[in-house]
Image (cartoon, rainbow, N blue to C red):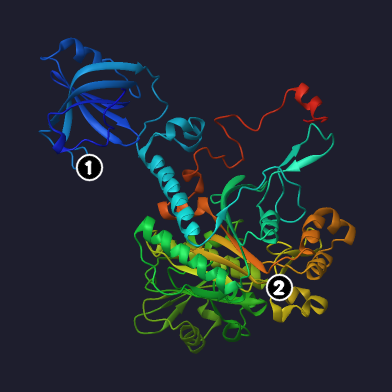
Amino acid sequence: MFRSHTCGELRISDVNKQVTLAGWVQRSRKMGGMTFIDLRDRYGITQLVFNEEVDAALCESANRLGREFVIQITGTVNERFSKNANIPTGDIEIIVSELNVLNAALTPPFTIEDNTDGGDDIRMKYRYLDLRRPSVRRNLELRHRMTIEVRRYLDSQGFIEVETPVLVGSTPEGARDFVVPSRMNPGQFYALPQSPQTLKQLLMVSGFDRYFQIAKCFRDEDLRADRQPEFTQIDCEMSFVEQDDIINLFEGMTKYLFKEIRGVELEGQFQRMAWADAMKYYGSDKPDLRFGMKFVELMDILKGHGFSVFDSAEYIGGICAEGAAHYTRKQLDALTEFVKRPQIGAKGMVYARVEEDGNVKSSVDKFYTQEVLQQVKEAFGAKPGDLILILSGDDTMKTRKQLCELRLEMGSQLGLRDKNTFACLWVVDFPMFEWSEQENRLMAMHHPFTHPKDEDIDLLDTDPAAVRADAYDMVINGVEVGGGSIRIHDPKLQAKMFEILGFTPEKAEEQFGFLMNAFKYGAPPHGGLAYGLDRWVSLFAGLDSIRDCIAFPKNNSGRDVMLDAPAALDPSQLDELNLIVDIKE
């Protein structure tokens, strides 16, 4: 028996027990004739004591132990004289009588501590060591618990878990596919699924009624903090439902997860906000509602007063930061530089302080009378001590997005984005299509199987850009954690959708004939939703990046620096796959 107990298990009630523990050496301290070692496993840390006066040889062996040596000890549980209230085992220690070194270890390249001295690159290269850190391990334990609770909830609601293939056909819409050459079918390729979308719709045609899967998905797209080339979805589909049925059920799942995992009770129905309002008032289809600073449009007030920047603008809008009039000129200049960064792209920023006497002091005072500035104050409902920040531009949507970035930055600076506060909402009534400059055509905002709102179907023939979709996203704290839609189940409407998206009948048949044919055999009305498991876990764990809740993530270049992947293939493998790779310098 390698161990009788784990390193996080023993308590004061176990004093005088003979125990055997196994784990890794966290740290070692020599104090006079005593050596103290912290032994760590997945479950916690226990202090070991070696006494030179009792067994000098054993103590000498303990002094030769290095960090991360794997050892097994036998000893007696003893009450600690100097207790450690920071760990669950802090009331006891083990007086060691036997020591067995199971494996020596090189000195790790960084400390295996919550506050490690290792940077991102080195920790990703030695990810198996990074996973030993308690903070990282807790993220993976949280992920495990979340998948258990998701399965429990969905099972209670009549869902059945079905695995769908990982080798599928390539799809023309959405992000780029990862492709896999087929050795047995020369010149042909599989694709890794961006989602199980069409397959779960086929399961509805098959009569499964309620399906779910915790599914691996793959997208060959540029990476950022909340994106990885491979990620995990809680993928769900339901038959004989309308939008409200899906929203209500998965709002229930959200409340269940918050209660079971975070101990947070979410009361009442979540707010629902139309996409058009989200863009108008927050400049984002995933607004962070933990704080205010709703956009106010100011064209009617600020145009036509001789300030050419505003007079020529298509959009003028601003936010009001309560109590921020104390910002210094240096801080305001830093905010101006922030919005002028290439990633944001604003040309400048105008500010106005509401003074204690109610007057407004502005950076463009010479162009505006106090009477006009008072109108600005009233438009925001601003009070003495508030700070008004204004942006303008010749592209309304672009300027709103710039203002969104400024709003989020102010929320962070003013401490309004508390990770332990949760603001949940549904964004609904998305546009059905968006214009692609690159493709020079309308593209599906979600995917080509999304059902248009019934009252907008007639617009498909006259004004498709105005059509709204039966689509919905769940947003929590400014993060889209999931989304879905009612699907098209009518073959004629689906064919119309493909036509608007620029598919010829032949191309639509080639790409999606299997789905269209299935619909002819009695497809039920259906719809679904997919939650991003990685984003959910990072939200619950208070992380800034989903990488920290994935066991073996890729870096920002899509590389696994631990496995050194992707990598070149041996020429013989390329020959088998009928591939010729010509890499030019």
Q: Secondary structure at mark 1?
A: loop
Instruction: Residue 142: give x, y in percent of width and height.
Output: 41, 48
Q: Establish if 116 lies above or below 349.
A: above
Residue at x 51%, y 31% (from the top left corner): 125
Residue 444 quadrant: bottom right
Residue 568 quadrant: top right
Horizontal arrangement in the rendering, residue 466 relative to residue 370 (left or right): right
Q: Are marks 1 and 2 in contact (CB under 8 Å)?
A: no
Residue type indicated by callout 2: Pro
- The CA distance from mark 1 to mark 2 is 56 Å
Residue type indicated by callout 1: Asn
Q: Is residue 278 visible?
A: no
- The C terminus lies in quadrant: top right
> Label 1: which residue?
86
Q: Establish if 43 lies above or below 353.
A: above
Instruction: Residue 562: give x, y in percent of width and height.
Output: 54, 30
Horizontal arrangement in the rendering, residue 354 relative to residue 307 (left or right): left
> Label 2: which residue?
452
Instruction: Residue 378: give x, y in percent of width and height.
Output: 46, 86
Q: Is residue 95 visible?
A: yes
Residue 140 quadrant: top left
In the displayed orientation, state which residue is furthest to the top. Answer: 57
